[in-house]
Structures are given as C-alpha cells and as structure tokens.
Image (spheres, rainbow, N blue to C red):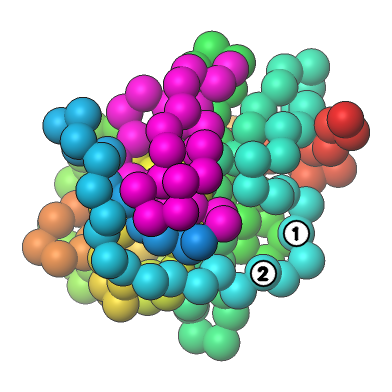
Amino acid sequence: MQKKSLQCPQCGSELPLYFKYSKMITCPYCKSTIFLEDDAVKLAGIESVINDEPSLLHIYKAFEYEGDIYRPIGRLQYRVDRYLWDEWWVVGNDGEAFWLSVDDGDYIAEKEIPFELELDSYDSVELGDRVSSWIVTEKGEGILEAFEGELPEVPKIGEKHHYIHLSDNDGTMLTAEFYDGQKSLYMGKWIDPFEIREILK
Ligand SMILES: [Zn+2]
C-alpha cells in the first residue's frame, strides 16, 4: 500500500507516504510538520501535540474490517466541549481514503460529497428540523486542537468548525461542516467497532 517515502528535512528520518494527494505530514520522530505541495518538501513550523487517549485505532497500524485492510495515516483532533473528537484519515488497499470519525464510541466512515442540500448556515436549522428527507439530530462546535500523520489538507490549529448531523431512516447520515466562511458535506455510515480487528505483525 505504501506508495513512496521522503526524508524528513529536519531530522533525516525516512517517512512513508501512503496517499498520493497528501498536502502535509508530521514526522513521528522529531514532530516537525512538513508541507508536501508542488513536489517541494518544506518545514511548516507548526507544532501540534495529539492527546493520546486509549483508542482502537493507532497511527500507521493497519486493521481489518469486513475482510478488507485499512490503515489510519492521519488524524485531526477536535475539542467539543470537554471531549476530544478524533477524525482519522484512513486509506484502503485500493488507495482510496476516507474519514473515520470517532466520537464517544461512535464510529462513522465519511466521504465528502457535493453540497447539494438546502442548508445555508449553521443557524438556519434546529434539532429535529427536516431538510428534505433528513432530520437534524445533532449540532455542535469543535475546535481543531491537534493533528498528526499524513493529511489531505493543511489543518489550521484553533479553527472553529460548526457541524450538523442529519440522519435518515436507513442508517445513512450526513455531516455538514461550516468553518472559515466555507461549508462541506460528508455522507457517512456507521462502523461497528467490534468488527475492527487489529493486525498483529
Ligand atoms: Zn523528523
């Protein structure tokens, strides 16, 4: 699954790269953050410390789910009230990547989709409202506190993300995110954490 690697410009360690569209990677040895854009490798000078609570998932440790192999290669860590919320960036054997959101024991695999939903702003709906066939089940605000690994976008520490969860009847869910004047929409499905098997090497 590993595509290539690069040498950390700070400490010289060899860093594996797993996803071809990554824009940033953190060095697990010296904690430097490195921009990967435009084929140039340069130090980003951002420091970030993940709060490593007990977790089923571990950075770079592959796991099996329903017969397929996946590897968490990056993580964003948000603070929502007093809790930490991890968004793992996970790549499969097919080279495709998705977000695996872990919120208080709930695991949701999410992929970004075009924002084709009549939802203009965070404040335009309340809990229980309907948006076409979807029902608003949760609203909240998270602040990006930390990140690690390989990521498809350059994270902004301290950035506030407002999110809205919407559910329908067949177990699919949507997450709308509003941040920094932008909005994104993700479609997700529940993952059964008891089916996540660590691969021992
Ligand atoms: Zn390094």
Pointers 1 and 2 in contact (CB under 8 A)?
Answer: yes
Q: Main secondary structure of the magenta part?
A: loop
Q: In the rendered view, does 54 fall on the left or right side of 162?
A: right
Cα separation, mark 1 vs mark 2, equals: 8 Å
> Tag on residue 105?
none
Q: Nearer the viewer, residue 167 or 143?
A: 143
Query: Which residue is identified by label 1?
Result: 55
Q: Amino acid at mark 2?
A: Asp
In the picture, residue 106 is in which quadrant? bottom right
- Whole-percent x and y of residue 109? 56, 39
Residue ID at (42%, 38%) = 7
Residue 170, compared with residue 165, is above or below; it is: above
- Whole-percent x and y of residue 31? 48, 62
Residue 121, compared with residue 197, is above or below; it is: below
The residue furthest top is 94
Q: Nearer the viewer, residue 184 or 75?
A: 75
> Tag on residue 52?
2
- Whole-percent x and y of residue 90? 55, 36
